[in-house]
Amino acid sequence: MDVFITKLNEDNVSQIRPIDDSFLVDSILIFTLADRQYTYTLEPIASCEKRYSDDPYGDAADGNYGDDMEHPDRAIYLAFADRRFAGLIQLKRNWNNYALVEDIKVDRAYRRHGIGRRLIEQAKLWAAAGHMPGLMLETQNNNVKACRFYESCGFVIGGVDFHVYKGIDPDSGEAAVYWYYFLNE
């Protein structure tokens, strides 16, 4: 599979297509904090399928990427596999000077081909070029495959928030997991 990553621009913005961002939820991360380091175990739960595209509050829910093309503290990189749109990563310089991964998604049909890793590597290059200390992102404790992926890319857990999703759903059992990658370590 021929994969290439390119920065979003006027010439390729029309190639962005809807992405099947669904994933299986069948376990959650259970956290332990000791000596300022998080570890986790997995707890099985009833399985279901989740997709962020169903979330009206999700990152880049409106698909309007035009403002990010010209902004010096923002970037979007597109991934193509065999010249077909396969995924993207949306970045911005955050208030704390980290490169915030606002969104990363790879279409289900193109997963397990290294595309997500290539997008993360591109984000690291963008952050380094902008003299940022690293990357940060947020995912949920029920997106176990994503959590393991970020860990395999060198990210560490910087924090867990059990209340952030309760504003949307008071009964939500999801926890936000904040991951960090440090460029100079």
Image (cartoon, rainbow, N blue to C red):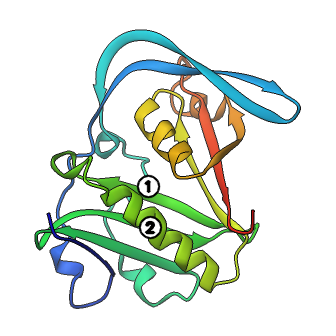
Residue ID at (46%, 43%) = 149
- Secondary structure of the residue carrying numbered label 1: loop
Q: Reply above or below: 44 against 98.
A: above
Q: Is residue 10 left or right of residue 90?
A: left
Q: Locate the C terminus and report the quarter of the image it occupies.
A: bottom right
Q: Amino acid at mark 2?
A: Gln
* Mark identifier at residue 90: 2
* Circle 1 residues within 10 Å: few <14, some 14–19, many ≥20: some
Q: Position of residue 14 (x, y in %)?
A: 17, 79
The mark closer to the camera, 1 or 2, is 2
Cα–Cα span, label 1 and label 2: 9 Å
Tell me which label, 1 or 2, sits earlier in the chain.
Answer: 1
* Circle 2 residues within 10 Å: few <14, some 14–19, many ≥20: many
Give the residue at mark 1: 59
Q: Locate the N terminus and report the quarter of the image it occupies.
A: bottom left
Residue ID at (57%, 32%) = 165
Q: Reply above or below: 180 against 127.
A: above
